[in-house]
Amino acid sequence: MVSISPSRSKLPVLNIALIFFSMLPVTMIVPVFKDIIKDKLGGDSLSVSFFMSSAMLGSFLFSPIAGYLSDKFRNRKLFISAFAILDGLCFFLLMEIKDLSILQGVRFLEGVCHIFVIGLLLSTIVDRENDSGNARFFRKGMLLGLAGMFLSLGVGLGSPMGIIKKKNPELPFIIAGWMMIAIGVISFLFLTEYDFIFRPKINFSTWLEAFKKNKLILVPSTYNFIDRFTVGFFV
């Protein structure tokens, strides 16, 4: 069941905060990739790199599925809560697995779980901005800008937190797991959902026609691809 905030002009602070905290666990574990894959399990550099890529592959493949399911069942909160808890359990499992192939498989599932969480949290922001009865935020991009800012902040602050690995290389995974479980519980208890605003379906021909009218859209799209590619390359 979707609950609607009584004050449409109220800033969705919890939604944005959860976006920030959801990004901390996934980058917190980056500094210990080598410790776990190479030093503990005897993997090579390719295995270390693929440990990052397997999660991204899971996110890439299941991102549209997350959106489809939440739209179909008209519920984002339940999916966010359930997959945040599953994500936390995946972090715990990653510490226990000794086989590299199984480890990469669980890492793939972790990426799937995480995209359900972060993708649908961002969807709640889009729902808020598409509410025509909300003059303060309607189609202004303000909330998405804030969400993007705190998402980036979470990415930037998460990695330095990996310094706690000096005490125990598995500690970042433990903290990441509990953080995601906490996010799941908090989401279930307190997260506010907003009206689902559905637009006419866009097929490929409609998209192509819109693209022909505004080919400059290639500029930010290309920049976004290069930006994400270089980040992954350096990691």
Image (tube, helix red, strand yellow):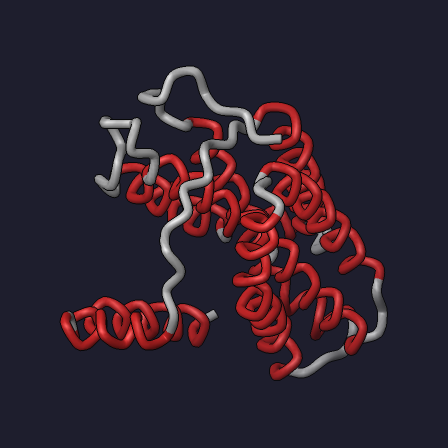
Residue at 45 percent across and 33 percent down: it is 195
Residue at 54 percent across and 49 percent down: it is 71
Q: Quadrant of residue 122?
A: top left
The vertical placement of 14 against 154, above or below, is: above
* In this rendering, position of residue 217 left or right of residue 96: left
How many numbered discs? 0
The vertical placement of 52 against 89, above or below, is: below
Looking at this view, is 160 or 226 the one in front?
226
Residue at 51 percent across and 32 percent down: it is 193
Looking at this view, is 212 or 183 the one in front?
212
Residue at 39 percent across and 74 percent down: it is 229
Looking at this view, is 82 or 18 the one in front?
82
Give the percent coordinates (x, y) of residue 103: 77, 69
Give the percent coordinates (x, y) of residue 183: 62, 36
The vertical placement of 176 against 77, above or below, is: below
- Whether residue 180 is visible here, answered yes or no, is yes
Give the percent coordinates (x, y) of residue 124: 46, 40
Q: Of all residues shown, which one is farthest toward the front?
A: 200
* In this rendering, position of residue 123 left or right of residue 85: left
* In this rendering, position of residue 104 left or right of residue 71: right
